[in-house]
Image: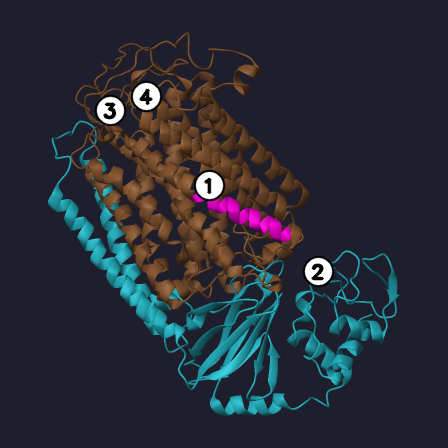
Amino acid sequence: MSTAPDIATQAPSFPKEHYLNASKGFKSWALTVDHKRIGLMYLVSVLTFFLVGGLFALLVRLELLAPGGMFEQKTYNQLFTLHGVVMVFLFIIPSIPAALGNFFLPLQLGAKDVAFPKMNLFSFYIYAVGAIVAIVAMVTGAVDTGWTFYTPYSLTTNTGVVLTVFAAFILGFSSILTGVNFIVTIHKLRPPGMTWFRLPLFAWSLYATSVIQLLSTPVLAITLLLLIAERLFGVGVFDPALGGDPVLFQHFFWFYSHPAVYIMIVPAFGIISELIATFSRREVFGYKFVALSSVAIAIIGFFVWGHHMFVSGQSEFAGMVFSFLTFFVAIPTAVKIFNWTATLYKGDIQLRTPMIYAIMFLIQFTIGGLTGLPLGALGTNVALHDTYYVVAHFHYVMMGGTVFAFIGGLHYWWPKITGRMYSEKSANIGAFLLFIGFNVTFFTQFLLGFKGMPRRYFDYDPEFSGLHAFSSVGSWILGVGFLVTLYCFIQSLRKGEVASSNPWGGTTLEWTTQSPPIAHNFIDTPTVSTGPYDHSEVPAATGRAA
Amino acid sequence: MSNFLYPPRASTYAGEVDALMNFINYLSIFFWVLITGLILYFAWRYRKGNHQAAPSHNTALEITWTVIPTILVVAIFVWGFKSFMVLSRAPGDAMEIHVTGQKWSWSFEYPEHGVRTMNELVVPANQPVKLIMNSSDVIHSFWIPSFRNKMDVLPGRTTTLWFEATEEGDYRFYCTEYCGDAHWNMKGDVKVVSAEAFHEWVEENSKEDTTTPLPELGAKLFQSKACFTCHTTDGTSSIGPTLKGVFGHDVELADGKSVLADEDYLRESILQPGAKIVKGFAPAMPSYQGQLSEREINGLIEYIKSLK
């Protein structure tokens, strides 16, 4: 971009004034309207819930380590439900948009803040209230319906369905407000010269995500309210005993929850584009396609919900239409992968930690995408639906994809957030352990699914025991990988090298201000005269290579 | 790929499903190796310092890699839809069996033969069979991995699933729609037998058992009606109260009263389980009214009496 970057020849010193020390005390955080502080509060919150959800997952895998019971069957059912509810509603949906998006969208736009800073804080408080309600629900009557709350089971179980569903209802509003805020921010706060096709791809992906959040989340809210009304007042909507239709719930639920899959993965696409551009020192190949395909995925994603319901009793005709449309959401996703691969061609590739995560993302997300093919095709879906194959498939997309991109993005922007570098050696050990642990845990589950292991089973037939044990061992490697990564970040905060304003040679505007940024981000509003990934005026990464 | 990866293949259409699965799997492996190979090669070949000029887009290339996958996925879609129609449409001469899913067991009724079973489906080989399925409580799903077919079982709506078994033998079926506490235990076997063996089995089971001593009959029913899914005989609590030492003792009820567990109480608990709920348990048991003969009820009561 046009603004001359600050080239640090000697070791930089930590800036005296920045957003973290601009004001002090509890009130300065509780009442802040600084998008960076709000992003940081979201980051701490979602990482905390990631830890909680991860502990639930480890307990699930512990139960499945060997045949026979370790917990009660009901406890197990509660554990996998809480794992799903916490990971979906409290971690992965807000993870990239609300944490990294809040922090970096205004910085990438050269703006002082998001369009509605107070609404941004309000949405954080809604998230906090939703989280508290969810915790109360967990403690007072941990729900056992699965995160999908399928009726009529969810209408009959004596666990805390109403409170949990109410928590998801509240959290939805936080998501809607963040979406509105980002859409307006991208429309109105772009700096002089930044046309739509000079927008960084992370911003494009947040735009597409925000549109989905805004349009689909209200449907979830309505569905969850109907469920609550039915449970509390006996209004017959979904329960056939009251004249309702249980499959209607599935239609409503997936009308939100399929687009929600794109709320989870599209921001990850944005991060991967940033990482690959910076560490290949090239413009992203086919930039316009990559930008617009996020929007295309967001739109087509609204018309494929019935592919979760091929054996639900919906008509064969509906099955055919949903299967056909599903394959058309696959194409823009596949082409994105080809574009990222082509960006590496003749690049100037530096395998720094964030880039290692990006490559791991590509390898794993490709598996996640390809294993969607037999699920989208009707004949094979029937055999694989509700087996471990599906569990493996969505973990390859959500964890192998989104979580790896999120952690990669966190490594990329860490110097900007904290002003400090981390030891790339220990970061890479963490990445390597996560890669091994993830694939051992979840690739095994494809095999379990092929062999005929149904999901959400407390115990299993003896022929599945070897693969289940192997998968559980993988979950421990994953756990260690996260501990190493956490250690690496803590060490960085304690004694990390001071980061320059642009340690990686990034070309987007967040790298033109100091690390960590001042409270108002930029001293002068930047102007833009080139595309987002013009490396000609930006020097390569400084500091030690991995 | 199919032999070590998939369950044994035992229905007429299983081969077609597996063929599509294999096609997709080989195609996926090819593309994954290609993409991963290119990524790793480029990452090594163009590592730091090997920077060269390269175009930022190439229309011909971009059209090619959009069109080829589109053709491939349309082919997969058509093949998938064709095989799905085979799975969905039962031939007209199929033998009908009614299936009821309930928490947490399956019952089967053969309308032409007057036979009822629980958690065990006996069918003749090489004969199309159509399952007409309902649920008496929440949504379940009936899945026979070796047959490659699956269908949800709904309350208040009828769904069907058909198959023609090709190989004699025992094949697992499972519930695959999460339905609560013992969802994992809502399983049983399909026994595929020869046509002659099927007729013999029908003969044997359509007559009422009048010879087995009552407690022994009760013990058999305790297994075949899947009572063990919720009730233990060793004194530990499960989904329902244990049956050990119940008879002749007072039982504390949820409404605070207590009742002596005599023959009459046991009979009522089998036929109208909701009438008296034991303290600490949810009213989850389905009624067995109409599913047991008088002699079978007596058999179960005598069996429970024997559990001291």
Q: Residue furthest top?
A: A16
Q: Position of residue A242 (x, y in %)?
A: 62, 62
Query: Could you tell me which residue is drawn at 40 percent across and 46 percent down?
Result: A259
Shade of chain B as shown in the rendered figure:
cyan
Q: Which disc number belongs to residue A478?
A: 1
Magenta stretch: give its range.
A216-231
Q: Amino acid at mark 2?
A: Ser
Q: Disc 1 or 4, which lies upstream in sequence? A: 1
Q: Disc 3 or 4, which lies upstream in sequence? A: 3
Asked if one can make out residue A252 in the rendered structure from this viewpoint, the answer is yes
Q: Nearer the viewer, mark 2 or mark 1?
A: 2
Rendered position, A9 above or below B245: above
Numbered circles on residues, count: 4
Query: Could you tell me which residue is drawn at 50 percent across and 92 percent down?
Result: B196
Q: Which disc number belongs to residue A194?
A: 3
Alpha-carbon span between mark 2 and mark 3? 65 Å
> Is residue A224 inside the magenta stretch?
yes
Q: Nearer the viewer, mark 3 or mark 1?
A: 3
Q: Position of residue B177 (x, y in %)?
A: 52, 61
